[in-house]
Amino acid sequence: MRASQLGYEVIVVEDANTTYNQGDRTASEIIQEYNDKFRSFAEVRPAETLLF
C-alpha cells in the first residue's frame, strides 16, 4: 500500500499466491478476499496478462 501512496503503479498477481483451508473458509475464498482488499490500492491481474 505504501508504494501506491508514493505514486508507484502497483500490480498484484491474483493467481500467484497460495494458502490452505482455514476453519470454515476455503483457500479460494481467502485468496479472493485478499485480492479484493488489494484492489483498494492496486491493479489485480492474472499472471498470463503480465510481461516481465
Image: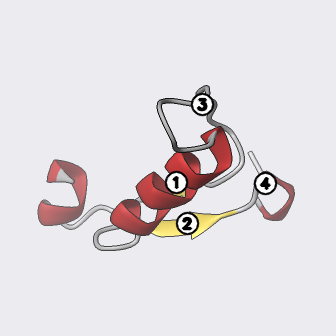
Q: Nearer the N terminus, badge 3 or badge 2?
A: 3
> Callout 1, which amino acid?
Val
Q: Nearer the N terminus, badge 1 or badge 3?
A: 1
Q: Residue furthest right?
A: 48
> Is residue 18 at least partly visible in the picture?
yes
> Callout 3, which amino acid?
Asn
Q: Are marks 1 and 2 in contact (CB under 8 Å)?
A: yes
Question: What is the CA distance from the residue labelled 1 to the residue labelled 3?
Answer: 21 Å
Mark 3 crowd level (few <14, some 14–19, many ≥20, 10 Å Cα): few
Residue placed under numbered mark 3 in the picture: 21
The label number, if any, that marks residue 44 in the structure image: 2
* 44 relative to 7 in the view: left or right: right
Q: Nearer the N terminus, badge 4 or badge 2?
A: 2
Q: Are marks 4 and 1 in contact (CB under 8 Å)?
A: no
Mark 1 crowd level (few <14, some 14–19, many ≥20, 10 Å Cα): some
> Callout 2, which amino acid?
Val
Q: Are marks 3 and 2 in contact (CB under 8 Å)?
A: no
* 47 relative to 43 in the view: left or right: right
Is label 3 in a helix, a strand or a loop? loop
Q: Quadrant of the N terminus?
A: bottom left
Residue placed under numbered mark 1 in the picture: 12
Of the two numbered discs 1 and 3 in the rendering, the one whose residue sits closer to the viewer: 3
Residue placed under numbered mark 4 in the picture: 51
Is label 1 in a helix, a strand or a loop? strand
Question: What is the CA distance from the residue labelled 4 to the residue labelled 2?
Answer: 14 Å
Q: Quadrant of the C terminus?
A: top right
